[in-house]
Amino acid sequence: MVKAYAQEHIYKHPWERVTSASWRKFADPENKRTLSHILEVDTLNRKLDPLSGKLYTTRALTIHAPGPWFVRKIIGQDICHCVESTVVDVQSKSMQLATRNVSLQKFIEVEEKIRYDPHPDNPTGWTICRQETSIRIKPLSAVASMAEKVEQRCAERFMQNSVKGREVMERICKYLEAESSGMAL
């Protein structure tokens, strides 16, 4: 059983500002409280392809993954390690992120894909963010209804965290906007 959802969000900021905010989202100290489930982010690899001009980045994320108490009891931990792969194509103005868990895989598989592109209605002023997430609980598949409830709870948590992430992105975009116009917030 797989729980999947997709959502879109329009940032009323240019693509360059939104993608800059994406890089700063986890590093900004003001966001530590809002994104308290993110414990650590480390850049593992960064490569700029001189021919295509694309930037390829791989980061390791350590997150606090709270779930129902009985699931934590079965698994024995509430920390999850993930890998985020990012491709930024400045020429086509596209930023794509794919994140998946590398720990707890015998219990749960989570994959999140996010893409930032200029909005077709206002390509120089707005950015569209498309997010797709899939969650699959493994050992509970024999007990389908329980697995479905756990997947639903995980999906709800991901959606709550997505809202927090968008709030952080909006705050950073406003900061970057003020910074580029020489104003202080």
Image (tube, rainbow, N blue to C red):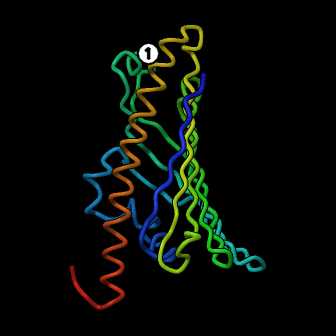
> Tag 1: Cα neighbours inside 10 Å, few (<14), some, or many (≥20)?
few
Residue ID at (38%, 17%): 73
Q: Position of residue 122 (x, y in %)?
A: 52, 75
Q: Position of residue 147 (x, y in %)?
A: 51, 17
Image quarter of residue 178: bottom left
Residue ID at (41%, 35%): 79
Q: Is residue 172 above or below residue 162?
A: below
Viewer-nearest residue: 85 or 17: 17
Dot 1: element: helix
Q: Position of residue 67 (x, y in %)?
A: 38, 27
Q: Quadrant of the C terminus?
A: bottom left
| 97 with respect to 126 (left or right) | right
Q: Identify the residue at the far top of this view.
A: 143
| 184 with respect to 171 (left or right) | left
Viewer-nearest residue: 169 or 118: 118
Q: Identify the residue at the far right of this view.
A: 51
Q: Position of residue 89 (x, y in %)?
A: 66, 72
Reading the image, the residue beneath label 1 is: 74
